[in-house]
Image (cartoon, helix red, strand yellow):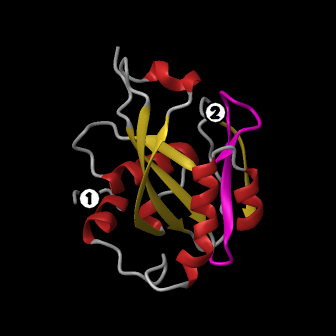
């Protein structure tokens, strides 16, 4: 059996007026979240993981928008109901945060095995709707990240992040 790698990305997809895209999990109806996903290999660049997961879960091509590595990572306990996806004894995951700024609320093509519905909400409502506290915190940080120094939309993206978002190698 192939196990998930306990290193992942969280991608907050948002518009200039801070509308945030949320997806409802197919395996847990009522659980809303941003795009998330694990590395496919230990060598996979994080920005490539982020761009791949966005495309797989929403149909949005990150390279056509502004993908930014927020330079922030957290560790959290993997929910017990999902630990069977990981090698025996793995109980913690490291999650790296990214933002993807799109020009407007876009239609989304869901991966039906992963998500049931999507919605765009103002960032405050989106943060309240998330089942995950860390996802809610990432969305709450969007207000200062999108408007302050070093924020998405104002910070210089890394060349590796930019190349990965358009499908190139970092």
Q: Nearer the viewer, residue 52 or 139?
A: 139
Viewer-proximal residue, 144 or 115? 144
Q: Which mark is residue 155?
A: none
Q: Is residue 145 visible?
A: yes
Q: Are marks 1 and 2 in contact (CB under 8 Å)?
A: no
Residue 145 image position (x, y, % from top left)? 53, 75
Q: For the C terminus, give its image quadrant.
A: bottom left
In the rendered view, does 131 fall on the left or right side of 68?
right
Name the residue that disc number 1 marks: 168
The residue positioned 48% from the left and 75% from the top of the image is: 152
Foreground residue, 119 or 99?
Answer: 99
Label 2 Cα neighbours within 10 Å, binned few <14 / some 14-19 / many ≥20: few
Q: Which of the marked residues, 1 or 2, is nearer the chain's N terminus?
A: 2
Question: Which residue is drawn at the image coordinates 58% and 78% (left, top)?
Answer: 144
Residue under the point 65% across and 71% down: 104
* Magenta stretch in the rendered image: 16-33
Q: Is residue 31 above or below residue 55?
A: above
Instruction: Residue 44 in the image: state x and y as whole percent.
Output: 27, 45
Is residue 170 or residue 124 the one in the foreground?
A: 124
Q: Residue at x 67, y 52 (%)?
A: 22
Local SS, label 1 = loop
In the displayed structure, 150 sits above or below 79; it is below
Quote the CA–CA distance across marks 1 and 2. Answer: 27 Å
Q: Does the rendering let one see residue 120?
A: no
Image position, residue 132 (x, y; %): 63, 45
| Residue, disc 2 | 112
Question: Per the image, is 17 magenta?
Answer: yes
Quarter of the image with the N terminus in it: top left
């Amino acid at each position: 059996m192939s196990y998930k790698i306990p290193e992942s990305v969280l991608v907050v997809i948002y518009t200039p007026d801070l509308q945030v895209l949320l997806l409802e999990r197919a395996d847990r109806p009522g659980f809303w979240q941003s795009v998330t996903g694990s590395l496919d290999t230990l060598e996979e660049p994080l920005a490539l993981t982020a761009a791949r997961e966005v495309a797989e879960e929403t149909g949005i091509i990150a390279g056509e928008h502004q993908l930014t590595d927020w330079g922030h990572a957290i560790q959290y306990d993997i929910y017990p109901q999902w630990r069977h996806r990981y090698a025996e004894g793995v109980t913690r995951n490291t999650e790296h945060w990214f933002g993807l700024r799109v020009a407007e609320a876009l239609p989304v093509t869901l991966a039906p095995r992963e998500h049931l519905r999507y919605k765009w909400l103002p960032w405050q409502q989106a943060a309240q709707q998330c089942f995950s506290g860390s996802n809610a915190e990432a969305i709450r940080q969007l207000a200062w990240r999108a408007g302050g120094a070093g924020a998405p939309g104002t910070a210089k993206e890394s060349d590796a992040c930019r190349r990965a978002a358009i499908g190139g190698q970092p």
